[in-house]
Amino acid sequence: MGKSIFLVAALVTVVIFAIVFSVVNLQESSMRNQLSQDITALYEDQQANKILQAYLGTLDPDTCVIFEKQISRQLNRIYDLFFRLESLQEKTFVTSSDPVKRQYLLASMSLWIDLQNASKYCSMNIKPVLYFFPNQKECALCDAMVTQFESLKKECPSVRIFAFPAQSDEFEFSELLKKQYGVSSAPAMVVKNRVLYEIVPMEQLKSLAGCT
């Protein structure tokens, strides 16, 4: 009798675990699919930047207005995608989100280049912050930095975060950025050419970013 009770209890536990596992898997799959669709839509929208630049050759005050609107709209979307991806990463224990992350990184790198090119000719009211993240999943300092980014997002509407891997065989562009700014370890954030490897007080971070 006692063994039967334990067997039933074990069976119920297995069934409950299987149900929870299936529900989580379904929810995560839905989140990943939606995130992937949104990143693809953003990447396609970014082609308008390439077309406009190719057509104009160089930007002037009149065309800057159009280009700034495009870039600002895309920056808002990539910023939202960054935090959604971070949220997904925390919930991911069933499947890997690497394909989605690659999509995000390609869109983010393309947008970073567009922003840099536009800034040469247009007075963009955008304050970019680079974030280089390590490969390991467990990173307390990374979590702290992302939390600070969330606070910065609320207090500084003009700040935008660009997240890139600190080590990658696929994205040489990320390695070039590290060399350009002298980033030697991760996690790290680059604020107006200053590299930060630790959390700094919010007021100091806002001052560095030029957010008043």
Image (cartoon, grey):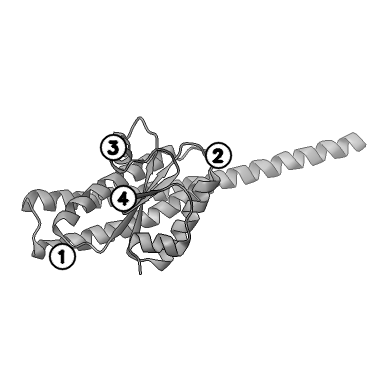
Q: Between tags 2 and 1, which lies in front?
A: 1
Q: Earlier in the sequence, mark 3 or mark 4?
A: 3
Q: Earlier in the sequence, mark 2 or mark 1?
A: 1
Dot 1 corresponds to which residue? 65
Dot 2 corresponds to which residue? 94
* SS label for mark 3: helix
Residue 176 is marked as 3
The CA span between labels 2 and 4 is: 38 Å
Dot 4 corresponds to which residue? 193
Q: Mark 3: which amino acid?
A: Leu
The CA span between labels 2 and 3 is: 33 Å
Q: Between tags 2 and 3, which lies in front?
A: 3
Q: Between tags 4 and 1, which lies in front?
A: 4
* SS label for mark 1: helix
The CA span between labels 4 and 1 is: 27 Å
Mark 4, other Cα within 10 Å: few <14 / some 14–19 / many ≥20: few
The CA span between labels 3 and 4 is: 14 Å
